[in-house]
Image (spheres, grey):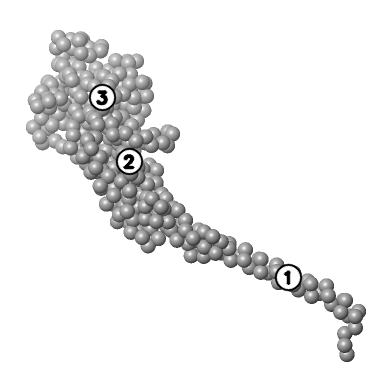
Amino acid sequence: MKPTMLTQQLGAPLNNQQGAVAVTVAIVLMVLLGMTALALDMGHALVARNQLQNASDAAALAGARALGVIYDGMSGSLTGYTLTSGQVTTVVNMATLAGGDNQAAGVTLAVNPADISVGIWDSSTRTFTPTTVLPRAVRVITRRDGAANGPVSTMLASIIGASSVNVTAVATAQLNPAGAMAPGDMDAPFGISEFFFNSGFGCGSTIQFAPNVPGNAQTCAGWQAFDISPPSASAMNGIVNGMINGTYTPPSSQAGLSTLNFTNGNMASVWANMVTLWHLRTQNGPWDAQVPVYAGSDCTPSGAQSIIGYATVRINYVGTPGDALNAANCTGSNPSTGCMSGVVQCNVFEGGGGSGGGSFGTFGTIPGLVE
């Protein structure tokens, strides 16, 4: 039976709807395909970025370690020191080699020398400032873009016109405040309270280890017997004698973990040997003693004190009771009191030294990542 005109008219809307559904399905499939392509290629780019980050981290650490090796061969305060062009080249070369040991998205990386900088990292503002004047940080950018190594090719996103994507990663490593001392590094039997540094004193300031003057933050320090317990004048005498004749090696120490034993009171029996030690240490130049910084504000410390960092002090005077120079060199001294003072040094680099201590002017030569 032939369809009547009525049935043809009734079937027309159905045919129209089938055509609309087909168009809708096609559009949805294209959108889903595009989203799938984008998700796959985004994942591929993220993997490449993680690989670039590993390369940047390795390159920055290698460059900062090279910087540490340079400083490790120098002594005393390096304030104002400027790297030579050869030293900068050494840092760049080490960073380049370390970065080149990595791949990103199947490509062995080359690091542009222009993407390697030495400078200063400001942890409070999280900014890097390039400079060759006493830099402590190295910043490295690794790339998969038109400037180096080529962009990362996409797999499916080319369907929507994106045939490649640029990917970069940045890392900064720096030489941090010293966080550890190896056996023998702490070569003087005294330490400084963090209160000294919190009271406006620091690098370039005079610190008076003895005598203590109540209310004077510049004398907030104390005698310490390292790991010997109980600490006493007798123990201190044995330590100083051992330092003189080479039979005593101070123990290792780590900021945040170690405690050292402090003592105060009558140290008259120790002074003569301290003067001998001072003369021995200054035979061939200044005595730059590395000393612990203990937590708290106790200016007459006694017993175990938590160590939070390390400072370097140039010991410029040790006087015995009755020394006529006492009054000119030390605050609050008198003929019956021994005197010992020095100047806290800035920008001293301790070989090894680790990281993690408070910022008291002495830095380690083993770098850590900061960005």
Examine the image and state in which quarter residue 235 appears.
top left
In front: mark 2 or mark 3? Answer: 2
Residue 66 lies, in percent from the top left, at 24, 43
Examine the image and state in which quarter residue 75 appears.
top left
Give the residue pinned by disc 2.
117
For label 1, count other residues whose C-alpha is less than 10 Å away and answer few (under 14), some (14-19) or many (20+): few
In front: mark 3 or mark 1? Answer: 1
1 or 2: tag closer to the N-terminus: 1
Name the residue at 15% across, 25% down: 286
For label 2, count other residues whose C-alpha is less than 10 Å away and answer few (under 14), some (14-19) or many (20+): many
As drawn, 6 above or below 223: below
Q: Quadrant of the C terminus?
A: top left
Residue 21 lies, in percent from the top left, at 73, 70
Q: Amino acid at mark 2?
A: Ser
Q: Alpha carbon of mark 1 to alpha carbon of mark 2: how far? A: 59 Å
**Residue 259 visible here:** no
Residue 39 lies, in percent from the top left, at 54, 61
Q: Quadrant of the N terminus?
A: bottom right
Q: Are marks 1 and 2 in contact (CB under 8 Å)?
A: no
As drawn, 239 above or below 219: below
Give the residue pinned by disc 1.
21
Name the residue at 43% across, 58% down: 152
Depth check: give the residue in front, 263 or 4.
Answer: 4
Name the residue at 78% across, 71% down: 17
